[in-house]
């Protein structure tokens, strides 16, 4: 009986993961201050760079940590999630970046941003620090982010 019961529990279908939304579906949920917004291609590049940086432990994650290291003068690319609400949580970060001439960019999803950083929880802001292990990917992202038009 133990085997039959065990086999029955294996046959129960596991809950399917929520289907991934497309870039355009995610952009529909972006808040009003999310400018400049990364293109689909740049978003993918940023996710790859974040994954590489998190393996090297060269990222800063979360509003408090990113804010602290911006104030300390640390350099890097600041990536913000465009679907974070309320915007009061992190609306000061882009201004801090602008004051210190740091590049910042918005991407559509905080869930995807957290996943790229290796976390199960959504993350609303990450700073990617430069490192020789992924310098080429970092430089490419930096170039693309700096080429984006500034918000009005």
Image (cartoon, rainbow, N blue to C red):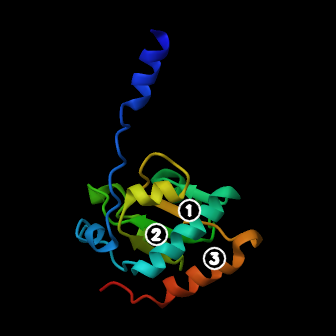
Q: Earlier in the sequence, mark 1 or mark 3?
A: 1
Q: Earlier in the sequence, mark 2 or mark 3?
A: 2
- Counting from the top left corner in percent of width and height, residue 138 is at 63, 76
Instruction: Tell me which residue sits at (53%, 80%) in the image.
Output: 101
Q: Earlier in the sequence, mark 1 or mark 2?
A: 1
- Counting from the top left corner in percent of width and height, residue 120 is at 47, 46
Snapshot quadrant of residue 150: bottom left
Snapshot quadrant of residue 38: bottom left
Instruction: Tell me which residue sits at (25%, 67%) in the image.
Output: 31
Above or below, comparing residue 120 to residue 25 in the picture: above
> Residue beneath label 2, please?
96
Classify residue 10 as left or right of residue 19.
Answer: right
> Element under label 2?
helix
> Element under label 3?
helix
Could you classify mark 1 by the number of other residues whose Cα lies within 10 Å: few (under 14), some (14-19), or many (20 or more)?
Answer: few
Residue 130 is labelled as none
Instruction: Tell me which residue sits at (29%, 67%) in the image.
Output: 26
Total count of labels: 3
> Does residue 25 appear in the picture of this structure?
yes
Could you classify mark 2 by the number of other residues whose Cα lies within 10 Å: few (under 14), some (14-19), or many (20 or more)?
Answer: some
Residue 71 is labelled as 1
> Residue beneath label 3, please?
138
For the residues labelled 1 and 2, the Cα–Cα distance comes to 8 Å
Q: Are discs 1 and 2 less than 8 Å apart at CB?
A: yes
Task: In the displayed orientation, state which residue is furthest to the top.
Answer: 1
- Counting from the top left corner in percent of width and height, residue 73 is at 62, 67
Q: Are discs 1 and 3 less than 8 Å apart at CB?
A: no
Q: Are discs 2 and 3 less than 8 Å apart at CB?
A: no
> Does residue 98 appear in the picture of this structure?
no
């Amino acid at each position: 009986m133990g085997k039959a019961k065990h086999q029955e529990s294996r046959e129960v279908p596991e809950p399917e993961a929520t289907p991934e939304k497309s870039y355009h579906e995610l952009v529909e949920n972006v808040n009003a201050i999310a400018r400049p917004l990364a293109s689909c291609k740049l978003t993918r590049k940023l996710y790859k760079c974040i994954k590489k940086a998190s393996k090297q432990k060269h990222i800063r994650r979360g509003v408090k940590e990113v804010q602290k290291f911006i104030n300390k003068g640390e350099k890097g690319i600041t990536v913000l999630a465009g679907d974070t609400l309320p915007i009061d949580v992190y609306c000061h970060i882009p201004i801090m970046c602008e004051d210190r001439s740091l590049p910042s960019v918005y991407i559509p999803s905080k869930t995807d941003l957290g996943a790229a950083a290796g976390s199960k929880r959504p993350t609303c802001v990450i700073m990617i620090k430069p490192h020789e292990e992924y310098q080429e990917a970092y430089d490419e992202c930096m170039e693309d982010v700096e080429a984006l038009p500034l918000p009005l």
